[in-house]
Amino acid sequence: MATQTVHILHTSSLQLFEENFSALIYQSENIIIRYRFLNSKTKNGHWDTVDITSVNGYKSPEEFKKWLIGLIEPSLANLYQQLLAVHHTYWEAYLAYITDKIDQLIMITEDERFVFHKEEFETIRQHRFKSFINCKLIGPGQEELHLFSQFIRFKAVRFAEVWVEVLIGTIDRIDLIHKLLIQSEKISEPPPIPDKNQKSEFNIKSNLTVPQLGVFFRLMSKSKVIDVPCRQTIQLIDWAIHHFQSKNREAIRPASLRNKFFTLDLAALDFWEQKLNEWLSMIREERNNILKTTVFYWITIELQTSCDWVTDVFMWGC
């Protein structure tokens, strides 16, 4: 092992994330949603209205957001000071590790689908929303909690969205810290010598908006069409930024695609639902064409065989 590497390992901590973001880690493991019922039970035996009184002690999403930012700000400031003591060749590795850990904290939320049934209108409406995974629900009616726990999480949707927004913003701040560190050291590298024989990197120009791209990569990842572990989600998004162009602009802002990957856009979901239906029609059409071609081929073979047999019989009789 190089002498410089040994020195780094002895003089700097490998627990930068745990040391700087311990308060945030604790909160991610202890999401508590307190609720109450505003009215008594209806004739059907269900509670009429559920009200979220607090999430981790904060009554409104705005207070929750301000508190989360207050937890993260000193952590980022301390991280910046710690990285100044580390050789610049290790900055990228440290920050990539921390970014990956924050990405995992984002994953304490998930997308759910809630179905509303309005009996008076005989209609059913579906709502997609983001909720906390493994959160603790505290309030009345614990013996019937399994009946309305999803509705409670639905009522706390804005708190879950705030959690995602703040952590995505934290990742963007870490990118900024990296740039500030590089600028402070005034690291300059000689420009690479262009290779005349080297082909330019291939970029895909799509007719998709950023929200549609966010849904596309989310579906590809979640359905396992592409094998990308959760811890490498940020790397997937960064790859997409450098290899895809959106419909409205050539360059995609990292923060924009990250936000639309973790917080899906309803219009973009409707767009992909329509596209999937179109693809299903195309698949059925192509399958039918193949089947028709196959059947025609075998009919031709059978006719040819029958004609040869008749010819042989006729020639034999002559």
Image (tube, helix red, strand yellow):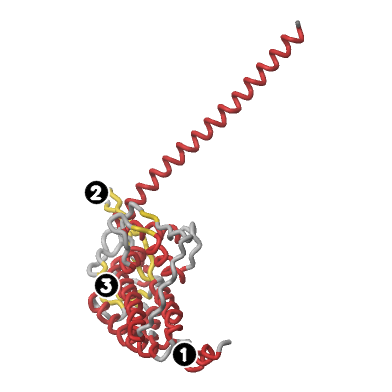
In this rendering, would 134 be left or right of 39? right
* Residue 232 % position (x, y): 46, 69
Q: Nearer the viewer, mark 2 or mark 3?
A: 3
Q: Residue at x 32, y 57 (%)?
A: 246
Residue under label 2: 121
**Distance from Cα at disc 2 to Cα at disc 3:** 27 Å
Question: CB under 8 Å between callouts 1 and 3?
Answer: no
**Residue in the image at 70% along x and 16% along y:** 309
Q: Nearer the viewer, mark 1 or mark 2?
A: 1
Which of the 4 quarters of the picture holds residue 38?
A: bottom left
Label pair 2/3, CB-CB below 8 angstroms: no
Quadrant of the snapshot with the C terminus:
top right
Residue at the outermost bottom position: 11
- Look at the image and tell me whether residue 151 can be seen: no
Residue position marked by numbered label 1 in the rendering:
13
Query: Image quadrant of residue 45?
Result: bottom left
Q: Which residue is mark 3?
A: 52
